[in-house]
Image: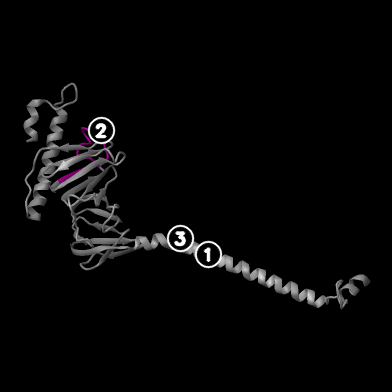
Amino acid sequence: MGRVGISIIRPWGENGETAIGKIKYSAVHSSRHHHSQLIRAGIFLIAVFAMAAAPSARAQTSAGTISSSSGHVQIHRGATSLAAAPGVAVNQGDQIGCAADGNAVIILNDQSQLTLRPSTTITLDQYTSGGATPTRIGLVSGILKSTVNGSSGSPANYRVDTLNAIVTARGTDFYTSYTDSSPQTGNLPGVSHYTEVAVLEGAVNLAQATAPNRGVEVAQGTTGTVAGDDPPDAHHRKFPTCDCDRDCDRDFDRDRERDRECRRECDRHRDREGNCKPDHDHDHQ
């Protein structure tokens, strides 16, 4: 106890320094070290917040505007839902869904137009106004008409993705439809994803989602399909194109049903090699 008491009250240190001076120096050094740690921690947190905020900022990139809508049409933006009324902005990352009574037209910032039919849901996965990276739309279900503003001589600047197909286009006008219950399920067992395209103007490349570099060209006035995991099939049978959207919608619906009937008939009358018999070729005209 005596030694401890003398050590604590000793006025001088071993090198002539005061004990109090040592304590003060130690406290100042500790304070500076602690301050430095706080600065480093602050810089680290700023970097973390910046990285976390970057995807959110990208997701909020403006892509276009609702031009017209009718019936029940909703925009889902993260955890928020809002009515897709005319004039409402749509952003990259939004999901737009039409109920069974809903229709909507979206004008993108580059003046391309997306027309959503009833019971159609899309996602604006990526929007770009030029360059090598295309605008990318996800078709979750239903029928989407795309009128793409671009040049036929430029690189593909627009893309529609379904669960089993990829459609890429330059300046063109085409329909894409997707259903998770194939109209040919009875004749093609196991097919649960079915994508169809019908080109009104220009041409598109249609590919299986698992083989995006092995697509086929679907020309103006023709249709193409991807059934399940099968390769894409371009149908060269022509269908009438028109200038009136209402007539186009009617012709497209009629053409889809004819195409389904033709393929069902073909499935019932295949030769030994699996090809459609020649006497049914007239069904493709």
Is residue 276 shown above or below 238? above
Q: Amino acid at mark 2?
A: Pro
Q: Residue 264 appears in which quarter of the rendering?
A: top left
- Please give the name of the residue rendered at 9% of the width and 26% of the height, measured from the top-left corner: 278
Q: Which residue is mark 3?
A: 51
**Is residue 78 among what the camera can see?**
no
Which image quarter is the N terminus in? Answer: bottom right
Which of marks 3 and 1 precedes in the sequence?
1
How is the rendered protein coloured? one colour
Is residue 1 shown above or below 157? below
Q: Which residue is mark 1?
A: 45
Tag on residue 189? 2
Q: Amino acid at mark 3?
A: Met
266 sits left or right of 215 in the view:
left
- Please give the name of the residue rendered at 25% of the width and 33% of the height, measured from the top-left corner: 189
Taking depth in this image into account, of 202 and 267 the one nearest to the observer is: 202
Residue 196 belongs to magenta span: yes
Secondary structure of the residue carrying numbered label 1:
helix
Q: Are marks 1 and 2 in contact (CB under 8 Å)?
A: no
Q: Residues within 10 Å of mark 1 (few under 14, many from 20)?
A: few
Gap in Å between the C-alphas at discs 3 and 2? 46 Å
Taking depth in this image into account, of 147 and 73 the one nearest to the observer is: 147
Residue 126 belongs to magenta span: no
Q: What span is colored magenta in the figure? A: 181-198
Residue found farthest to the right: 2
Q: Amino acid at mark 1?
A: Leu
